[in-house]
Image: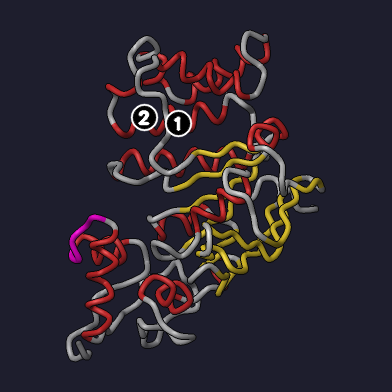
């Protein structure tokens, strides 16, 4: 099957600061691609470059064989690319129903029979949104707002869905439901590219993982082909070598593996946790649960 999205050597800069240096990836219809890496690695900027919200400096982005570079974001959306940004980006003062209508308006389908059918499909997928149709979106819980943000994208009936940190700040139950939704959308033929902090969950639903470090792809392939070193190094830093050493690690990144952390790596973990607004213990627990880190057996170095 030919790729629906082709990104080749993408480079994006903010003024003189290059945020994405060299990112290449391809996504087929029905495929879920997880984009992984530490804060500041260039993951969000990669999605912004694809959807046209930030102009690329170099490289190419093609959707269904058509170049997206230089195209206005609204035109890209009408081609079938929907972007759910980090932070949800809903209209808090508008009702749930009006937020969904804004998705239709952007796709030029507001008031059409097809648009009404798309809204009904979203309300079937997210029953809480039907229940809260007249409620101001900003008064709902974080999980409900995230469902609305995704629903607003889905009413456009996109062929490619870009999800940026959809699980941020949500309860584990809501996160699990959203990952089930992602897998279901892929089975229906939608291509999905997601930037995700819950690495273990992302690897379970992803067909391909792309690991970005300092704006460049450092590893890519099916999750089973990536080692925990591949991913751990991107999150904890390192100059060509994994800062996190995983003794005897399986090559399958979905499996849990033992880990020894040197003091310098503990400090990196603390800095990463602070950047994410978490404690080091919370982040370490998340990494443990998501198949990146596990406590070293007794007798290991610390």
Specify whether residue 279 is painted magenta: yes
Rendering coords of residue 175 (x, y %): 36, 43
Can you say which quadrant of the picture contains the C terminus? bottom left
Q: What residue is disc 1 on?
A: 149
Q: Is residue 167 above or below residue 115?
A: below
Q: Is mark 1 in CB contact (under 8 Å) with mark 2? A: yes
Secondary structure type for disc 2: helix
Residue at x 56%, y 73% (from the top left corner): 219
The magenta segment is 277-281
Specify whether residue 258 is painted magenta: no
- The tag on residue 57 is none
Residue sitting nearer the eye, 281 or 100: 100
Q: Is residue 212 above or below residue 85?
A: below
The image quarter in which residue 245 lies: bottom left
Q: Residues within 10 Å of mark 2 (few under 14, many from 20)?
A: many
Rendering coords of residue 11 (x, y %): 62, 63
The image quarter in which residue 73 lies: top right
Q: How many marks?
A: 2
Cα separation between marks 1 and 2: 6 Å
Q: Is residue 229 above or below residue 255?
A: below
Rendering coords of residue 126 (x, y %): 44, 24
Residue at x 64%, y 55% (from the top left corner): 56
Main SS, magenta residues: loop
Q: What residue is disc 2 on?
A: 145
Residue at x 40%, y 60% (from the top left corner): 200
Rendering coords of residue 241 (x, y %): 45, 87
Residue at x 34%, y 46% (from the top left corner): 168
């Amino acid at each position: 099957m030919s790729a629906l999205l082709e990104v080749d050597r993408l480079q994006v800069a903010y003024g003189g600061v290059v945020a994405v240096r060299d990112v290449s990836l391809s996504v087929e219809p029905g495929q879920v691609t997880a984009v992984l890496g530490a804060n500041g690695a260039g993951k969000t900027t990669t999605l912004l470059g694809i959807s046209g919200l930030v102009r690329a400096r170099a490289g190419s982005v093609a959707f269904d064989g058509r170049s997206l570079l230089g195209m206005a974001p609204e035109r890209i959306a009408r081609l079938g690319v929907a972007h759910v940004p980090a932070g949800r980006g809903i209209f808090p003062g508008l009702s749930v129903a009006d937020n969904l209508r804004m998705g239709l308006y952007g796709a030029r389908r507001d008031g059409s029979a097809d648009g009404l059918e798309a809204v009904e499909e979203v309300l079937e997928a997210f029953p809480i949104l039907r229940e809260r149709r007249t409620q101001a979106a900003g008064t709902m819980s974080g999980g409900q707002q995230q469902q609305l943000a995704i629903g607003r994208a889905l009413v456009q009936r996109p062929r490619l869905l870009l999800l940026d940190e959809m699980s941020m700040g949500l309860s584990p139950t809501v996160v699990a439901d959203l990952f089930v939704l992602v897998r279901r959308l892929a089975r229906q033929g939608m291509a999905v590219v997601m930037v995700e902090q819950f690495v273990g969950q992302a690897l379970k639903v992803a067909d391909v993982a792309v690991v970005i470090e300092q704006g460049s792809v450092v590893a890519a392939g099916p999750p089973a082909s990536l080692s925990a070193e591949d991913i751990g190094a991107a999150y904890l830093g390192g100059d060509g070598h994994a800062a996190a050493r995983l003794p005897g690690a399986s090559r399958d990144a979905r499996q849990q593996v033992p880990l020894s952390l040197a003091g310098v790596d503990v400090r990196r973990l603390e800095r990463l946790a602070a950047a994410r607004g978490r404690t080091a213990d919370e982040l370490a627990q998340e990494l443990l649960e998501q198949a990146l880190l596990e406590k070293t057996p007794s007798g290991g170095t610390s």
